[in-house]
Amino acid sequence: MENDAMKKHTSPFIVIAVVILAVGLAFFAFQLLFIQPDSKKVACSELPSAEQVQNILTEHTDIIQELGRLGPENTIRFDADATRCPGKADIFIIYGTEKQRHQIKDRIGDNFFGIPYRMANM
């Protein structure tokens, strides 16, 4: 009889744990399917020099500022990322919402003036 009582008390905990696990897996799958496609890493051998990337960002500050106005202050940033490949870089774009991500992609396309980019929601 004690086993039956114990089973009745543990069943809700198991159900809650399974629901939490399912929600976590669904969120992870959403991240992989819908967020990660904008985070394509280009091979180091195909990246431009860090200096070229910085020059492009400097030349097109007007467009970067225009895109920055899509959201509240400091929610959209464009940075040269030279951490993955010594001497080489790509552009790392930080955005705040999925709407901003779509607006940025619509405006700049698959690259930013020939420079590959990766995006992250922060």
Image (cartoon, rainbow, N blue to C red):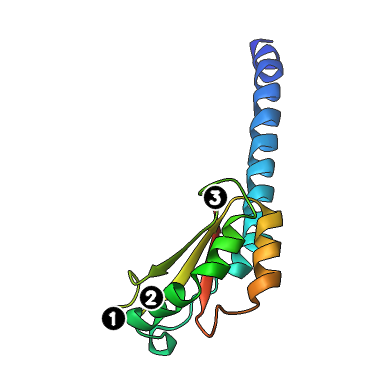
Image-based side of 68 in relation to 49, left or right: right
Q: Which amino acid type is shown beneath numbered disc 3?
A: Thr
Q: Residues within 10 Å of mark 1 (few under 14, many from 20)?
A: few
Quick one: SS at disc 1?
loop
Do residues under tags 1 and 3 come within 8 Å of each other at their CB atoms? no
Dot placed on the residue nearer the N-terminal end, 2 or 3:
2
Which dot marks residue 75? Answer: 3
Do residues under tags 2 and 1 come within 8 Å of each other at their CB atoms? no
Q: Which amino acid type is shown beneath numbered disc 1?
A: Gly
Q: Which amino acid type is shown beneath numbered disc 2?
A: Gln
Quick one: SS at disc 3?
loop
Quick one: SS at disc 2?
helix
Image-based side of 119 in relation to 26, left or right: left
Q: Residues within 10 Å of mark 3 (few under 14, many from 20)?
A: some
Dot placed on the residue nearer the N-terminal end, 1 or 3:
3
Residue that numbered label 2 is attached to: 54
Dot placed on the residue nearer the N-terminal end, 2 or 1:
2
Tell me where residue 20 appears, x and y as whole percent: 65, 36
Residue that numbered label 1 is attached to: 87
Do residues under tags 2 and 3 come within 8 Å of each other at their CB atoms? no
Q: What's the residue at 55%, 78% (across, down)? A: 112
Give how far apart the Cα atoms at labels 2 and 1 are.
Answer: 12 Å
Tell me where residue 40 appears, x and y as whole percent: 54, 74
Looking at the rendered image, the quarter that the N terminus falls into is top right
Label total for image: 3
Quarter of the figure with residue 11? top right
Frontmost of labels 1 and 3 is 3
Q: What's the residue at 42%, 85% (across, down)? A: 47
Query: In the image, is residue 85 above or below residue 26?
Result: below
Closest to the observer, 121 or 57:
57
Give how far apart the Cα atoms at labels 2 and 3 are.
Answer: 20 Å
Which dot marks residue 59? Answer: none
